[in-house]
Image (cartoon, rainbow, N blue to C red):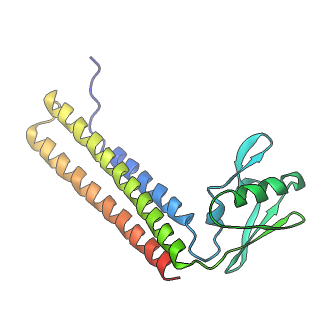
Amino acid sequence: MAAIQPFDKEDMKRRMKGAIATVKGEFGGLRTGRASPALLDPITVEAYGTPTPVSQVGTISTPEARLLTVQVWDRSLVQAVDKAIRQAGIGLNPQVDGQLLRIPIPELNEERRRELAKLAHKYAEAARVSVRNVRRDGMDHLKRLEKDHAIGEDEHRKLSDELQKLTDENIKEIDAALQSKEQEIMHV
């Protein structure tokens, strides 16, 4: 039987921080009525036969608070970028001007704000579940270590408490990010 790996608290921390980074990235893509290049991050364009992020086929900028522009580098991709943005389901309608796409950011109505807040809650819950899964993996690992007499009962309890504390801190950080994003959505 293969030797059981020692408990790696840093790995648990890294995996939990990964869930937080993911949810913050998803929050960045939620529209709040202000132009942000992050709005286009999740959008991919069919370029040269491969799905490619918009940011890799053109320069995205925000010349005004309610306007995004995409300067597409290859003229043959302008229509593909336009189509990808329109079909992304984020309510943006680019206006093509040569190789430049102007994307006005419309005002958010109350219903759309509620939908975005609901989506933010869904992202946050997925991140919480991810953090809890890391905790569960860690707890299972600790049980195996104790069962195989690699650690004692006291060490198991101490490490379990540390893992729970780490989990609570990360969930608190997710909740804070959610609250901040929710305020940004509802009070723009």
Depth order, front residue of 97/16: 97
Image quarter hosting the N terminus: top left
Quick check: 27 left or right of 70? left
* Residue shown at the point (54%, 65%) measured from the top left: 28
Quick check: 125 left or right of 60? left
Q: Is residue 128 above or below residue 38?
A: above
Is residue 87 visible in the rendered structure shown here?
yes
Q: Is residue 139 above or below residue 2?
A: below
Q: How far from the left and from the top, in percent, is residue 166?
A: 27, 55
Residue at the top extreme of this rendering: 1
Q: Quadrant of residue 96?
A: bottom right
* Residue shown at the point (62%, 64%) measured from the top left: 90
Quick check: 187 left or right of 44? left
Q: How far from the left and from the top, in percent, is residue 74?
A: 86, 54
Quick check: 187 left or right of 102? left
* Residue shown at the point (58%, 77%) measured from the top left: 108
* Residue shown at the point (52%, 59%) measured from the top left: 26
Q: How many marks?
A: 0
Q: How far from the left and from the top, in percent, is residue 97?
A: 87, 68
Q: How far from the left and from the top, in percent, is residue 151?
A: 15, 35
Q: Quadrant of residue 95?
A: bottom right
Is residue 149 visible in the rendered structure shown here?
no
Q: Quadrant of residue 20?
A: bottom left
